Amino acid sequence: MKQPADSRSDKISRTGMRIRRATLDDLNSLVALENATFSADRLSPRQWRRHLVSDSVCVLVAADSQRVHAAALLLFRRNSRVARLYSIAVDAGARGLGLGAALLAASEEASRQRACTQLRLEVRRDNIAAQKLYLSRGYQLFATRPNYYEDGEDALRFARSLSGV
Ligand SMILES: CC(C)(COP(=O)(O)OP(=O)(O)OC[C@H]1O[C@@H](n2cnc3c(N)ncnc32)[C@H](O)[C@@H]1OP(=O)(O)O)[C@@H](O)C(=O)NCCC(=O)NCCS
């Protein structure tokens, strides 16, 4: 069932974390989170650095006063109303607390602020937890990309309309 926005933000505030835009100061934490979360198709430190200063990228993090616990990377294209959620990652010790859902909601809001009307993403066919997150938040499967990832796994492509919400 879809969670009301209030209860979601209550859940996050109980963790002592807040969602904010990342800065270059978060570079090391983002790289550490990336390396701890993904074993392949990783972004390099240089790619993260470029994303953090790019006008067509928005990096959001869930962080407390100590460190970053989760991050989402959003890509925008000039003259396109379609935003792309390139990746979302929650530290293994902070999963199940609502951070993934909160970052997804914040990504949708950031996309709306850029006048985007749709948010798209790809997810591995074997990543059931992430698919459940997307399906429970109104995303629909619209295509598949066979052999998309480095190890040959297929990508499922999901999209959600951002207009009229
Ligand atoms: C997928 C991921 C982002 C979810 O983040 P999270 O903070 O643990 O998720 P949340 O606590 O916000 O849960 C939101 C929803 O996701 C789904 N979900 C999350 N973890 C799940 C699990 N282990 N099994 C089944 N469903 C799960 C549920 O539908 C849940 O909704 P509910 O709380 O209303 O039941 C996190 O597991 C992760 O970082 N995984 C590794 C990286 C990854 O796979 N990224 C996505 C592809 S790029």
Image: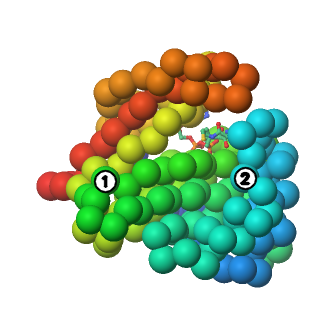
36 or 153: which is nearer to us?
Answer: 153
Cα distance, mark 2 to mark 1?
A: 22 Å
How packed mark 2 is, by other alpha carbons closer than 10 Å (few <14, some 14-19, many 20 or more), is: some
Q: Residue at x 28, y 59 (%)?
A: 80
Looking at the picture, does residue 137 appear above or below residue 107? above
How packed mark 1 is, by other alpha carbons closer than 10 Å (few <14, some 14-19, many 20 or more), is: many
- Secondary element under disc 1, as helix, strand or loop, is strand
Looking at the picture, does residue 129 appear above or below residue 99? above
Q: Which mark is residue 82?
A: 1
Q: Position of residue 29 (x, y in %)?
A: 81, 66
User: Can residue 93 be seen here?
Assistant: no
Q: Say left or right for 139 vs 68.
A: left
Q: Are marks 2 and 1 in contact (CB under 8 Å)?
A: no
Mark 1 residue's CB less than 8 Å from ligand 1: no
Q: Say left or right for 131 vs 135.
A: right
120 or 43: which is nearer to us?
Answer: 43
> What number of labels is visible?
2
What amino acid does circle 2 point to? Leu
Q: Residue at x 43, y 22 (%)?
A: 144
Q: Ligand 1 is in which quadrant of the figure?
A: top right
Dot 2 corresponds to which residue?
43
61 or 27: which is nearer to us?
Answer: 27
Q: Position of residue 76 (x, y in %)?
A: 41, 62
Q: Residue at x 51, y 18 (%)?
A: 146
Q: Residue at x 57, y 27 (%)?
A: 148
User: Can residue 161 be seen here?
Assistant: yes
